[in-house]
Amino acid sequence: MPTTVRAWGAPAEAAPLESMTLERRDVGDHDVRIEIERAGVCHSDLHTVRGEWGDQPYPLVPGHEIVGTVAEVGSAVQKWQVGQRVGVGVFVDSCRECDNCRAGLENYCRKGMTGTYGATDRDGSITQGGYSAQIVVDEGYVLRIPDGLDLDGAAPLLCAGITLYSPLAHWGAGPGKQVAIVGLGGLGHLGVKIAAAMGAEVTVLSQSTRKADDARRFGATDCLATSDEATFTENQGRFDLIVNTVSADLDTVKYLGLLNTNGTLCQVGLPSSPMSVPAGALTGGRKSLAGSMIGGTVECQEMLDFCAEHGVVAEVEMIRAEQIDEAYDRMVASDVRYRFVIDAASL
Ligand code: NAP
Ligand code: ZN
């Protein structure tokens, strides 16, 4: 018998979110039932339910920054015990057979990962996300939340944290490296904290300097306004790595100009229009324009352990379920300091 659980979701495209229920499958041999305690609010949730990413199956319950406690495990599950603190991120399954899945890079599964919400699950049902009281997930897609991490601040690590950790680790952010993070929102503020913990010198490129004090508190040495043309003329050739978290269309060529020789501009924000770059903006200085999407289970666990070791958690504003739409509006207005997190008790 499936279990009916409380949730908040969108009944239709661009409709306000409302209280609803959804069914969670029975715990199979390899499944884990998680009692959700916190769910982070990612800008991707908003893109999805407000129709910015095309047609979706409705009703749809978003949420892919999930933390809670194991409530039940399947008969074959050895890795997890009832009562353990665990998390679930942006995907809940993948083909498990391709080279990427076998390497722990399920986010780049050749057949496509199964997203935590709005995706077709193995049994043909549509996955529903973390703005809900419980979730049932295969044991291989569950992550351990280290004891040292505060639960409120840990939730956003499951998407925002790994999305920044992965490119920072891949492109070698560390001592002697100049790293810039574009956009100080949910993703960006964790990028600053993680890059600083890795030992890099970090600069924030924000629309204005109004978040400069926060940027420094998170570990940045500099906060520059992208509305000021001098930022682009005075910092030409400065950065080894720029990670762009902004979902609006930016002038990519201007940011490429800030890269050092051999530098990389890595896109993690997802603007809706195609990016246009003349080849010459890359050839001079052997520059790379790259992208990165979340991270696999192995790296996600590594990131959680790294954050526990370095005391990195998100700066959060706790909200109740009925405040989700207001939180979305504030995200659109860049008025989030720095991640909204839903207290599942309010569902
Ligand atoms: P967020 O909390 O809303 O932060 C985005 C930040 O971008 C804002 O705080 C703002 O920072 C800046 N910004 C907003 N509008 C801007 C504009 N018009 N021009 C310049 N800068 C602007 O969003 P988020 O949750 O961090 O997500 C950011 C993007 O990443 C979204 O597109 C999301 O879908 C995507 N995402 C990608 C992945 C991946 O795996 N690649 C994973 C998760 C999310 P300032 O105030 O500092 O300028
Ligand atoms: Zn996300």
Image (cartoon, rainbow, N blue to C red):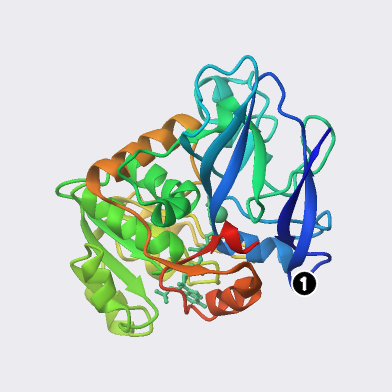
User: Residue 240 versus residue 303: which sits nearer the camera?
Assistant: 303
Residue 107, compared with residue 271, is above or below; it is above
Give the residue pinned by disc 1. Answer: 14
> Residue at 35% across / 83% down in the picture?
208
Res 119 visible: yes
User: Residue 133 versus residue 251: which sits nearer the camera?
Assistant: 133
Where is residue 90 drawn, in percent x and y? 58, 45
Q: Quadrant of residue 48?
A: bottom right
Residue 326, compared with residue 76, is above or below; it is below
Which image quadrant: the N terminus?
top right
Res 289 visible: no
Q: Is residue 259 toward the left or the right of residue 54 in the image?
A: left
Which image quadrant: the C terminus?
bottom right
Where is residue 139 drawn, in percent x and y? 58, 26
- The amino acid pointed to by label 1 is Ala
Count of labels in the image: 1
Q: Is residue 109 toward the left or the right of residue 264 in the image?
A: right
SS class, disc 1: loop
> Residue at 31% across / 75% down in the picture?
232
Q: Is residue 182 toward the left or the right of residue 94 in the image?
A: left
Q: Is residue 60 toward the left or the right of residue 309 in the image?
A: right
Where is residue 185 drawn, in percent x and y? 43, 68
Where is residue 84 drawn, in percent x and y? 46, 34
Q: Quadrant of residue 201?
A: bottom left
User: Residue 252 versus residue 207: which sits nearer the camera?
Assistant: 207
